[in-house]
Amino acid sequence: MKTHSKTGTKINILLSEMLEIGRAYGYASPNDMFYNHSESNKGRFLYLDSKTLLEKPFECYSTSLHEFSHYISAGIKLFGLKKEWTYWYGELLAMLCEDMMQEYLGIEDSDIDNLIHTPKGRIDNGNYCSWCYGLTGQSASTYSVAFMLGAWLSRNFGGAKFIKELATNPYVDMESIINAVNAMGGKQYTVVSLFQKYAEDMFYPQVGKGLNQNAATYSGNAEYTCSYTDLMGTWKTYLYPITPINLWDKFYGWCDLSPNQALEKLFVNESISFDDLPKVNTFKRHDWKDQPIPKTAFLGPAVFNDGRILYKQIGPYAAMLFNLGKAETDSVELKVTCKGKPKDVLTIYVR
């Protein structure tokens, strides 16, 4: 690119009316990084929706960081290490980039109208359906579940230092996550033990546990600061703060989207009035024209009261949470029925 591209190594931002023909705010194409590729535009390009930039600039700012992160991943993992990753892993890395750069963009956690333009705006959907989808597919739910996992990992295992390790270690997918967690110098985890901890931390708010805590901002780590000159020529330093997330906040509330809210009676989560959800909440903005508008919204990751009448798949690396009540005796019998011959590992974690 230094010699073949008209713009050298500069990043080109191309605006077009993307939402007129699709549903993307932006995208990146690694093919552009190769001058001789048949689908290359012969330059380093970020593609953003022009209407979004005009009407929702914070969405475009966050998206540009997200897409640029994909180029970094391609350079390190794909071109450098010859590793190809599953879709959720690339999106997890890109959303963690948005997450730790949120303050740089000027988006405060208290500004929920703009917080919706960060990955935190996806958590309400993840609270509702993470157990069902898990880390699979390429839908909006994939982004929600991947970010919930990434947010928990970064807030429990080292902040920006963990994110850098995840982005640069010689692995992809779950192997990359486990190695990044264990590189932080604490307890050595397996996939099973890590997800046991994740499931426990999601269950109910507890002081000092899970995402519902006063998480550290991970500032002051000199190895991971970034010095730069702003547009006014002022020398500044960025500290990659990662702010707390309270999964039980109303901003992350959700409603039952099953036909006629058929699952609603199975949830034991704390409930609030649907009207109490903030107007920017995903479910408040949902098109309810073919469904009755719910009266109730729920807080926190979905917790069920009974597993006998659910015939749903549990997604890969997902946790399905139940509160079956208080044991009246010293022993409890739990029956699990698996249809067919599943090859996956199912872990039952009881507290």
Image (cartoon, helix red, strand yellow):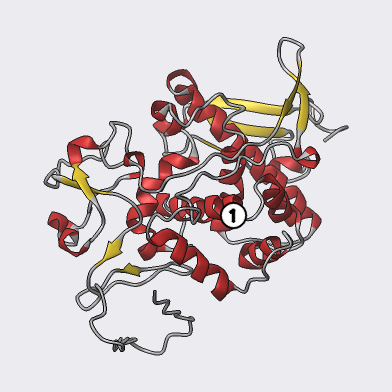
Q: Could you say which is closer to the camera, residue 285 or residue 82?
A: 285
Residue 136 seen = no
- Residue 275, given in percent of the width and then of the height, sits at 18, 36
Q: Is residue 6 left or right of residue 28?
A: right
Crowdedness of circle 1 by 10 Å Cα count: few (<14), some, many (20+)? Answer: some
In which quadrant of the rendered view does residue 84 lie?
bottom right
Q: Is residue 204 visible from the viewing direction of this image?
A: yes
313 w.r.t. 8: above or below: below
Residue in view at x 41 percent, y 90 percent: 341
Question: Can you give x and y, in whole percent of width and height, for residue 196 in the image?
Answer: 50, 71
Q: Secondary structure at mark 1?
A: helix
Displayed quadrant of residue 258: bottom left
Q: In the rendered structure, which amino acid carries the disc numbered 1?
A: Asn
Q: Residue furthest right?
A: 3
User: On the rendered image, what quadrant is the N terminus found in?
Assistant: top right
Is 22 on the left or on the right of 166, as rendered? left
Q: Quadrant of the C terminus?
A: bottom left
Instruction: Find residue 151 and report its horizontal and vertical position in percent.
Output: 54, 50
Q: Can you say whether 256 is above or below 197 in the image? A: above
Residue 324 lies left or right of residue 161; in this view the side is left
Residue sitting at 58 percent across and 26 percent down? 105
Q: From the viewer's perspective, is residue 48 above or below residue 221?
A: above
Q: Quickly name the residue at label 1.
A: 156
Q: Quadrant of residue 97?
A: top right
Residue appearing at x 48%, y 68% in the figure: 317
Counting every numbered tag in the picture gives 1
